[in-house]
Image: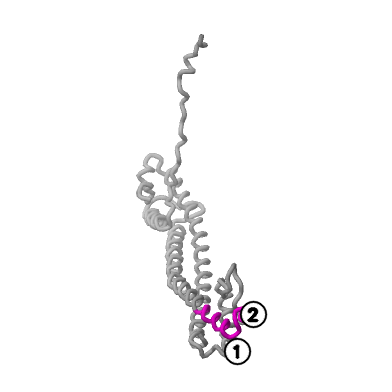
Amino acid sequence: MLAPTSEMSLVAPITTTPKRRTSPLPTSAVALAALATKAATAWEGSDLPDLLWLSKADFTTLSVTYAQGRDEADAAGDQRTPQAQRLKELDKQVDKALNYVKSYLAEEYDTDEGRAYFSEFGIAREGKSYRLPAARTERVKAVAKLLVALKAHSFDKKKYGTAYWQPLATEYATLVQTSADAAGQRSGMVSAKDQSETQLRKALRALIHHLKANYPDTFEARLREFGFQKESY
């Protein structure tokens, strides 16, 4: 005979799913800049007073600084794109042309003896193949060595001799340096933008509480006036 079951045991336990809180601020930089600009304009034209640690004017400056920093960082990234593409093309040219140089060495000294001169031409073993270094700063140095070695071994007049390698080496070295400078510049811009974003988010959160505290009955409408519309971002 089955044991009697209590009435409570027949009732399925009630489970509650915790509500996920939505951030009142957008995640994208574009939307954040737009919100900050809208909020700065609204605050400046309202009767809402300054915060003790942040004035309306300072908030306006902060929002403008962030927007400008975002634009500059994006522009620096766009500027690097053509350089990066051209460097990829030059890397392919270098790798292809190097095969002909290795053929010159193999013909002149036979395969084994030719390999003995690889280091003189800037060629080193990477993985399972002999090539110029993959790291671009090291590749610049290796190509410079190759130019000297071409002449020393009387390969300079060949099809893939000095006339081929010199302009390639010059453009490659220039692009590597320019790309490194641009990367450093963009890194600095991104760092500055990130610091500015941290300050801006802190100010926007404070402004939300400032509105709620000063307009307890109408703060939802006030938030929308200041640009805090979560459904739009």
| Relative horizontal placement of residue 39, taking residue 177 as reference (left or right) | left
Q: What residue did someone put label 2 on?
A: 116
Is residue 116 within the magenta segment?
A: yes
Q: Is residue 143 magenta?
A: no
> Is 49 or 11 nearer to us in this picture?
11
Q: Is residue 16 above or below residue 64?
A: above
Tell me what residue is drawn at x 44 percent, y 52 percent: 27
Crowd class of label 1 (few under 14; some 14 to 19; many from 20; radius 10 Å): few
Query: Which residue type carries mark 2?
Result: Ala
Residue receiving disc 1: 152
Indicate which label's residue lies in the foreground, 1 or 2: 2
The magenta segment is: 97-118
User: Is residue 227 left or right of 197 when viewed as pictured?
Assistant: left
Q: Quarter-wise, where is residue 153 in the image?
A: bottom right
- The image quadrant that residue 139 belongs to is bottom right
* C-alpha gap between disc 1 and disc 2: 15 Å
| Label annotation for residue 70 | none
Q: Secondary structure at mark 2?
A: loop
Amino acid marked by disc 1? Ala
Relative depth, front residue between 96 and 139 = 96
Q: Which tag, 1 or 2, sits closer to the chain's start?
A: 2
**Residue drawn 43% across and 51% down?**
49
Residue 146 in percent (x, y) is at 57, 83
Outermost residue, top direction? 1
Q: Position of residue 37 (x, y in %)?
A: 39, 58
Q: Nearer the viewer, residue 187 or 228?
A: 187
